[in-house]
Every structure is written in structure tokens, then in C-alpha cells.
Amino acid sequence: MHEESEVLVSREGAIVTLTINRPRAKNSLNRAVFDGLRAQLAQLRHDDAVRAVIVTGTEGVFCAGADITAFEAIRAESLLGERAAAGGGFWSELGSFPKPVIAAVERLALGGGMELALACDIVIAGESTKFGLPEVKLGAIPGAGGTQHLIRAIGKSKAMVMLLAGDFIDARKACDAGIVAEVTADGQALVAALAMADRIAANSPLAVALAKDAALCSFETPLASGLEHEKRNFFVAMRSADNHEGQEAFLSKRAPKFTGQ
Amino acid sequence: MNNNEPVIVGAVRTPVGKRGGCLQKWHPVDLLGETMRQLVERTGIDPLDLDDVIVGCVLQWDQQHGNLGRHAVLAAGLPESVPAVTIDRQCGSGQQAVSFAAHGIQAGAYKLVIGAGVESMSQAPMPPSFKLGAPLGAQYSPRELARYQDPPLLPQGASSELMNKRFGLTREALDAFAVRSHQRATEAIQAGRFNDQLVRLTMDPLDPDSPVVAADEGVRADPNPGKMAALKPVFSEDGATTAANSSQISDGAAALLIASRAYAEQHGLKPRARFVSTAVAAADPVIQFTAVLDATRKALQESGLTLDDIDLFEVNEAFGGVPLMFQQEFGIPDERLNVNGGSVAIGHPLGSTGARMLTDLLCELERRGGRYGLQTICEASGTANTTIIERLG
């Protein structure tokens, strides 16, 4: 772990925690953060020993959004190509990441920070966390999935209040609306995320990946295609060694040993 | 094999909350009741089989008086036929409750018992002795005081300075120990080492959708040695005990399920540990803290084990000097002492701590595949408990 690095990496068994480390800028997102997260995800994708990833921020703050000093760099970018200053390939890397990703959120998840949380599979938040997409107040709009993910997560009317008025909501409201899975006491989101990741990592990594893949498919397809997609994944899971192991372990009342095969 | 041998078949605890913190809304009866409810649920026992519930609690007034254990049984929704008793061995109350549970099984009087501890230092009024410079409490009788005139009996904080002096424990050593406690507890929390034994609680007992309490609240991820060194000693100007190198004032509960081997086998409960010895001792009530040494010698002698046989030591960090004194007297290697931090970082809900430590000790032995664990707690007025357990399976 490099103290100077914008993204810190720690590993505990099958769980990897990626921590945005720009505390003086409230962990806002810049090119170095995007590149760091993207490089880590690209590597973790192929590491079979890793079963869940947590994304969080240093010093009790998740992420205050895009770094405002990077706006010039974003404006200067070509409209063609990867548009790396705004995250570029990082967002597609995260969007297609096959393993569970949990956001452990404290205090601020604003703008790009909220988009980052929305792009993760599960969000766990300290109770004082503020969520918001205030881009319109700066004459911009969300550019990393904010409009698309939010409306799917909480529905049109509630999403529009946040998108058009730039209103913030707290963690309890975000939980009621469906953005957040679990609210914790302040400062305990990461611990709760680790506990959640432990529960996920105890399951078959293959079944978890197939379930995530089928669930995310629902955002992209009509129901009939989604159901067909799910059925195919179901039969793949049923023929896996993990499924046999799960059945045997259940019948003999022992903990299963899953291999992902 | 002795069918009456007591074995631990379940152990859970709450996260420890700071006084006025995330567990402050929990009435101590409900806090313990919920802990026991989840213990029963997890172990899958028939609660009608519970012969007794033995609960340690120290501040037995207001919300915590009138046999708190019985109230907790009723609040937990356990059958009305489950009895309970509440005991007081000061800071070792939770440990003593578990010992009594084991003894009852050994004697053949019980087959299945809960040994537990609880304290809400947010809700129960604090004893007068917690105020600096306050006179000793009303429990000190004229004849007892007359027996100890020179030197006189003292509140625990003042006694900690006598210990620091007698055993040559410096401010630097105490502060370094406090930093180590926070660092080790942080590491344990971040590695999820406490997760298996924690019961699930929300901040508001009446609102299941309120924030989840997921971890011990008092642990500092980034303890600041500079700030610690700047604190003034609390009990005497040239002393070494400060707020930072003493235990924290806290809320919490813990509960262990103890069964006879025969009951465990008949009901498919996995024996997780057995009791090798459960000793109590008492020594000088002026210095108050040295009985942990006597109780430990007694427990070792009873067990036939040596210090080298013990994989893990848990010594309550009522004051940082206690584990340091223990370590110095017995020559305990640092890597076997309070390996996941202690009451300095985690907090010290008085009656709960003994059961909390035993729960954490057992789970850590299981995690490492260790065999023997020793736990000791110093208690006000100079008593102490030492328990040695052996992990099974």
C-alpha cells in the first residue's frame, strides 16, 4: 500500500477494499482516482480468489464528486474517444465488473460520488450521509450515469427532484427510496460492508456472478428476454460443481466449500 | 467422559457503544433480552429447557435493579418458566455469571444455562465514586473504614496510581499500551474478526429501520499519540493514569450458552469449549488490582497447565496498568496478550465485560485453532476472577 497513492488497496481473505485517498479534496474524483480504480478492477476481474470488492473513501468521507479543478481538463477533451478526464473507461469497467461491488459511504456522496455509489451493486451508508446530484446548480448535468441509474433506482418523480432542483437526501431517505440497502451508525458503514461482503463471499462465487449478471440484465431487456437470460444462467448454475457441493453440504448439515467451478 | 461436564455451546455479544452513543436508547433489560433472544435463535435450543439465566450487572439501581435478569427473560420473549438471577462481582460480574453457570452444571443442578452480563452506563445513573474527589460510597461501613485507616481505602482511579508506582509502570508505557489497544481493535474490526459473534442491533430499539450498530463505537482507527501524551493525569499531578489509557464508559451486553456434555450431545449442540479452571481470589483492597495475579496462579495450579500452554491471554484493561502489570509479572509475550485490543479501545460496560471478553476469547481461539485461553479481570475492593478454557472440536 502506498500512502501517497490516490487509491489505496487492502485485502482481507476474499475481499478487497479500494479506498479513494484524496482526503484534502474530500475524495473528489480526478484522473488519477479514475485510473487507479480502473486498473484495480481490471486486475481483480481475473483474480479468482477475490469474491467481493468494497469501494470507500478515506477519513470518513465517501466522495464529494468530480474535482472542480478538473473541469477545464474535461472541457478540453475531444468529444470523440474515451474522455478519460471524466472517468472514461472506468465507468464501463465498473458497469461490466462481474463480481459484487459494495459502496461503503460516509458523510458525502455528491455528484460523481453519488454516481459512483449508484453504479455499485449495494450501497451501505452512515446515517448522516448526504446524497445528491447538484450538477444543475453549476450549469452542468450528471455525466456518469446519474440520470439513468437514479431514475431506475427510485422512479421518475423522486429522481427528478434530485436532478432538477439539486436537492440532497439523507441516508434514511435514500434507504427508503431504494438507493441504500442498509443504514449504519456514523463511521460504521465500512464495517457493515465488510460483514456483508463476508456473507457474500461465503456463497458460491459462480452462483453469485450468475445472479448478478441475470439481475443487471433486467435493466437492459424486455421481461421475456430477461426471463430467458435468467433461465440459462440457472441451468449453468445447476450443473456446476458448486451446486452439487451446496446440496451435499445442506443435507449433511455442514458448511459448503465452494470453488467457483 | 463426565456427562456433567459444562461446555460452551454458544456465545454472542453486542457491539459496545460509547456512553451517550449508539446504544444509549436501549434499556439495559431490552439490550440483554435482545442479546439472549438472538443467542437462543442462533443455537436453535428449545428455551423451555433453560434451567436458569445468570446475569452479571454492577450498577444495580434504577433501570438495572430488581433482578434485571428476570426482566430480561420476559423482555426477550422467553418462556415464563425460565428463571433468572442477577449477581454482582463488580467488573468481573459477567465472567462470574458464566462460572456460576458452569458450576451449576458440574454439580448436576443444571443441564442448560445462560451466563450473561449487561450494563447501560448511558441509562443507569453513575456511582458517586466516578466523580473526581468524591468520597467513597455508602457501601463502605464504619468498621471497614476503621480497619483501613493507614493507608486508607481509595476509589479505583486513585488505586491505579498505587499500582503504577509499585510496578514501575510509566506514563509512556501506559500511553503506548493504549495506542496498541486501539490499533489492535481497529485491525480486528477491519478484518471482520468480531462479526461472527455480534448480535444485530439498530440504534433505536423501537425502530427496526433505524441505523444498524455494526461495530464497537469507541475504537479509534487513528489514535493520536501526541494528543494522548498531552492529557493531564486524572488522579494525581505526578500520576500516569489518564482518560486515554483507562477503559471507556460504555453500554453493552454479552451472553454465553452453557450445557452439560450429555445435553449437548443429545440435542446436537456442538461443544465449542470446556472449562479447565475457574478461580477467584482476593488481595489488598487498597491497591485493588493485584488479585488478578493470585487468581491466575490459582487457576494455573488447579489446571496443571503452565503459562507456556496458554495460547491467548485476555486481561481486562480497566486501567492500562493492569495488563502491563500482568505481563510484567508473568513474562507474557506481547503477541499472546489482548490480541484484539481490550476495554481501553472497545469500552467497558462493567457487568458485560467478563462475558464479552470470554466470547471474544473463544472466537479468537477458534479462528486461530488455538487450544487454551486464559481470561482475568480485576474487581473493585481487591477481588479477581481467572478462567481457563480449552477449545474443543
Image (cartoon, coloured by chain):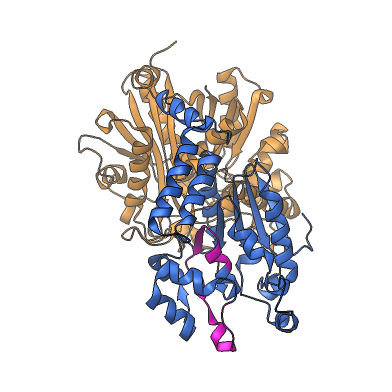
Chain colours: A blue, B orange
Residue A244 position in % (x across, y down): 48, 28
Whether B168 is among the magenta residues is no
State the residue in front, B236 or B67.
Answer: B67
Q: Is B61 situated left or right of B368 in this image? A: left
Q: Is A236 situated left or right of B75 in this image? A: right
Q: Is A139 situated left or right of B101 in this image? A: right
Task: Please tell me whether residue B244 is drawn above or below residue B107 in the rendered image.
Answer: below
Tell me the residue at 40%/28% (across/down). Answer: B258
Residue extent of the magenta highlight: A116-142
The answer to whether residue A212 shows anywhere in this view is yes
Residue B349 position in % (x across, y down): 47, 50
Task: Please tell me whether residue B115 is drawn above or below residue A131 in the rendered image.
Answer: above
The answer to whether residue B136 shows anywhere in this view is no
Residue A169 position in % (x across, y down): 45, 75
Tell me the residue at 45%/73% (across/down). Answer: A170
Residue A198 position in % (x across, y down): 54, 44
Which quarter of the rendering shows the N terminus of chain A? bottom right
Which quarter of the rendering shows the C terminus of chain A? top right
Query: Residue A115 sits in which quadrant?
Result: bottom right
State the residue in front, A101 or A199.
Answer: A101
Q: Report the number of numbered marks.
A: 0
Tell me the residue at 68%/69% (across/down). Answer: A88
State the residue in front, A22 or A52.
Answer: A52
Whether A121 is among the magenta residues is yes
Task: Please tell me whether residue B124 is drawn above or below residue B91 in the rendered image.
Answer: below
Q: Residue furthest left?
A: B80
State the residue in front, B99 or A193.
Answer: A193
